[in-house]
């Protein structure tokens, strides 16, 4: 309404119209958050979360081939690689099942034939009779398993048993190699996807590089900055750009040996104005002393609470009430110390960042000297 009154083109809105506009914005913001981003953001990084997508879960075989990589944070070609790995692994397992069932049937048949040939009519040896019975049962079990396998894989039906075993034995080495190759290709793409998801979930903290920010450094963040550190960063920004312009101009000179010297001196002068770290070092010393004091206070509070609790257990009811008040007072003090510890640690981290930044500036000055 103040803008409408200022421009005098649109009349000011009535209270009812303002409420309608507010409700329109309120509903649309809910749709975009709870109806879209609150659902999509967790999902797009879920498939290639390295804590969930593991060798034990076997998502590379049972999940990845069936979900499009375009719906998730992934690497191009990952779904095709997962499909190739799944198909190759299924073929290997199919051939191995046929080989295992056929080989077991051959061995049980040979063992049964050997025992029957060694058996004599009217034999009274109970061990031989038990072995012969077990061999017949094993032969029957192997025959049923073979029948189940060739029913599941009818392309092997009608072929001699020895021929099936020999064919599978010839196929398995090549299939084992193909499974290793396809798994390696898939794992390479998965590692790249895991890194992308880590960056998406944890931000720049997941990267080994330092001094990376999701927003430009000239923005003020209350959780990271104080007015002093923010002004120091702005000063480094201004002087650093001036030094960079001088270095670029020196690099573009046709005769850098002579004409570039004044420009290099100008760059050193710009950097020298922001190469002082005494204030940050003093702050670091102060906060380290504060942290030591806080740690001492926390230890003393824990010991006091432990001693008071021990005394409370052996005290009469009236004394217990007094001890409860004292324990509550010390607990509140301990809680305040915990909060203070977090704030002081933030101050320590800011001082360390300031010192590291000034150290890099001094390293640049040494290179220019």
Image (tube, rainbow, N blue to C red):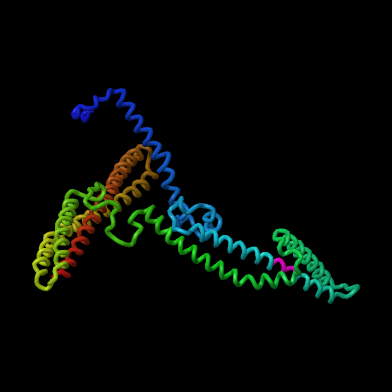
Q: Percent from the top left, x then y, of residue 266?
A: 10, 64
* Residue 170, magenta (yes or no): no
The front one of 247 and 102 is 247
Q: Residue furthest right?
A: 122
Residue at (72, 68) in percent of width and height: 102
Asked if residue 101 is among those painted magenta in the image, a careful observer would answer yes
Look at the picture and state if 159 lies above or below 19. Answer: below
Position of the N terminus by quadrant:
top left
Q: Residue at x 72, y 64 (%)?
A: 156
Split into 4 quadrants, where in the image is the C terminus? bottom left
Relative to 174, is 297 on the left or the right?
left
x%, y% of residue 89?
59, 63
Magenta stretch bounds: 100-105
Choose between 303 and 245: the one closer to the eye: 245
Residue 36 sits in which quadrant? top left
Left-right relation of 341 to 130: left
Query: Seen in the image, is 306 located left or right of residue 84?
Result: left
Task: Tell me what residue is drawn at x 12 percent, y 65 percent.
Answer: 268
Name the image quarter holding residue 282: bottom left
Magenta: main secondary structure: helix
Q: Residue furthest bottom?
A: 118
User: Which of these two is toward me, 262 or 286?
Assistant: 262
Residue 9 place in picture, x, y as percent: 22, 27
């Amino acid at each position: 309404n103040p803008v409408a009154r200022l421009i005098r083109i649109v009349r000011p809105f009535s209270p009812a119209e303002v409420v309608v506009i507010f409700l329109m914005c309120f509903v649309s913001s809910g749709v975009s958050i709870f109806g879209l981003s609150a659902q999509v953001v967790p999902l797009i990084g879920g498939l290639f979360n390295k804590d969930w997508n593991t060798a034990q879960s076997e998502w590379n075989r049972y999940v990845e081939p069936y979900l499009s990589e375009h719906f998730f944070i992934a690497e191009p070609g990952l779904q095709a690689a997962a499909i190739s790995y799944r198909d190759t692994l299924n073929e290997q397992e199919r051939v191995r099942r046929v080989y295992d069932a056929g080989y077991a049937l051959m061995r049980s048949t040979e063992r049964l034939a050997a025992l029957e040939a060694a058996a004599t009519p009217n034999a009274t040896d109970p061990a031989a009779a038990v072995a012969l019975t077990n061999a017949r049962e094993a032969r029957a079990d192997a025959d049923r398993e073979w029948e189940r396998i060739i029913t599941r894989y009818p392309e092997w039906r009608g072929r001699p048993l020895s021929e099936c075993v020999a064919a599978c034995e010839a196929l398995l080495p090549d299939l084992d190699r193909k499974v290793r190759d396809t798994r390696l290709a898939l794992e390479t793409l998965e590692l790249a996807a895991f890194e992308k998801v880590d960056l998406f979930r944890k931000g720049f903290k997941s990267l080994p590089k330092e001094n990376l920010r999701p927003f430009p450094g000239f923005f003020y963040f209350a959780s990271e900055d104080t007015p002093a550190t923010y002004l120091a960063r702005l000063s480094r920004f201004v002087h650093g750009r001036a030094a960079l312009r001088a270095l670029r101009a020196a690099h573009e000179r046709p005769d850098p040996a002579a004409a570039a010297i004044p420009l290099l001196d100008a760059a050193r002068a710009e950097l020298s104005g922001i190469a002082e770290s005494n204030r940050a070092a003093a702050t670091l010393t102060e906060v380290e002393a504060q942290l030591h004091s806080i740690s001492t206070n926390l230890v003393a509070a824990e010991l006091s609470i432990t001693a008071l609790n021990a005394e409370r257990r052996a005290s009469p009811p009236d004394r217990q009430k007094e001890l409860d008040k004292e324990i509550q007072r010390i607990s509140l003090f301990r809680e305040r110390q915990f909060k203070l510890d977090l704030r002081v640690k933030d101050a320590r981290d800011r001082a360390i960042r300031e010192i590291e930044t000034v150290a890099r500036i001094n390293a640049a000055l040494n290179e220019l000297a």
